[in-house]
Image (cartoon, rainbow, N blue to C red):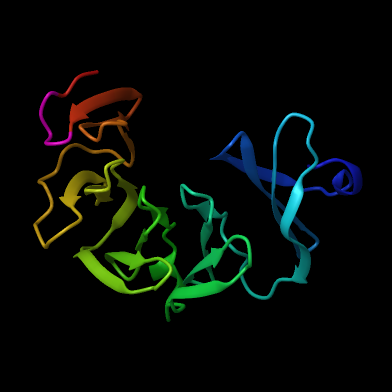
């Protein structure tokens, strides 16, 4: 995908993900000399040629460039931020929905979007709060407000969200208005287990695994 006419491009980058039936969805991007090249399509490896779903479009970007794309599990939507606004684009078709308008202060809305496993919600930190937005409708709901919020991670069962607050890991149920857990350890990098019952995190140079309720810590 980065060969042929793209072989001379300096920043050709490919993101691909499985969508079933032996097919891959792919996204090719290139940023060279302030140009943004974007193409999305599907192909069945190893020998089938790609089918372009959208692109290739080339546009001179104004202000800040888009962040890397964050795709729903189905590959049908792409969430991204641009100029501190949050957007979702349908694939194919290219219809864009504004989930959140650009912030007055860009530095307050530099979080990266995180998808719910079912692809129906996007979560992001904006203006010192964790927000949930429905897709494609764009209805927003504030889950939790606090200063110095960091990375988000939604559990695979879609019921809980882990996040860093002042460098301390916390967990909150997504439904309702329950308070988050007390601090579960100093970690800014963490990930859920596939069964949503535990988390793995890096604390300094050490890999630590613990239960989702903060018990059973092991290294």
Residue at image point 44% right, 63% down: 110
Q: How many marks?
A: 0
Q: Position of residue 40 (x, y in %)?
A: 68, 54
- Of 69 and 17, which appears nearest the observer? 17
Residue located farthest toward the front when viewing the structure as drawn: 21
Vertical relation: 60 (above or below) 24: below
**Magenta part of the chain:** 212-216
Q: Main secondary structure of the magenta part?
A: loop
Residue at image point 55% right, 72% down: 96
Residue at image point 33% right, 36% down: 191
Q: Position of residue 218 (x, y in %)?
A: 20, 19
Residue located farthest toward the top when viewing the structure as drawn: 219
- Of 98 and 62, which appears nearest the observer? 98
Indicate the quadrant containing the C terminus: top left, top right, bottom left or bottom right.
Answer: top left
The answer to whether residue 105 is magenta is no
Instruction: Name the quadrant containing residue 197.
Output: top left
Indicate the quadrant containing the N terminus: top left, top right, bottom left or bottom right.
Answer: top right
Q: Position of residue 119 (x, y in %)?
A: 40, 54
Q: Position of residue 43 (x, y in %)?
A: 71, 41
Residue at image point 50% right, 69% down: 87
Vertical relation: 142 (above or below) 217: below
- Of 92 and 102, which appears nearest the observer? 92
Vertical relation: 111 (above or below) 173: below
Instruction: Name the quadrant containing residue 103.
Output: bottom left
Compared across the picture, whether 193 is left or right of 85 comes to left
Compared across the picture, whether 70 is left or right of 120 comes to right
């Amino acid at each position: 995908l980065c060969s042929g006419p793209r072989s001379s491009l300096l920043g050709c980058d490919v993101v691909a993900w499985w969508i079933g039936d032996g097919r891959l969805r792919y996204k090719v991007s290139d940023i060279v000399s302030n140009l943004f090249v974007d193409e999305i399509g599907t192909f069945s490896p190893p020998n089938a040629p790609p089918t372009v779903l959208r692109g290739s479009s080339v546009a001179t970007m104004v202000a800040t460039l888009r962040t890397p794309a964050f795709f729903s599990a189905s590959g049908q939507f792409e969430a991204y931020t641009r100029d501190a606004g949050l957007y979702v684009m349908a694939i194919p078709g290219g219809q864009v929905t504004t989930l959140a308008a650009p912030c007055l202060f860009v530095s307050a809305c530099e979080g990266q979007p995180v998808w719910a496993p079912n692809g129906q919600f996007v979560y992001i930190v904006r203006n010192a709060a964790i927000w949930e937005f429905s897709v494609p409708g764009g209805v927003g709901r504030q889950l939790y407000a606090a200063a110095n919020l960091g990375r988000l991670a939604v559990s695979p069962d879609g019921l809980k969200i882990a996040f860093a607050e002042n460098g301390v890991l916390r967990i909150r149920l997504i439904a309702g208005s329950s308070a988050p857990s007390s601090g579960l350890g100093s970690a800014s990098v963490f990930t859920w287990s596939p069964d949503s019952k535990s988390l793995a995190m890096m604390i300094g140079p050490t890999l630590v695994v613990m239960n989702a309720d903060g018990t059973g810590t092991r290294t």
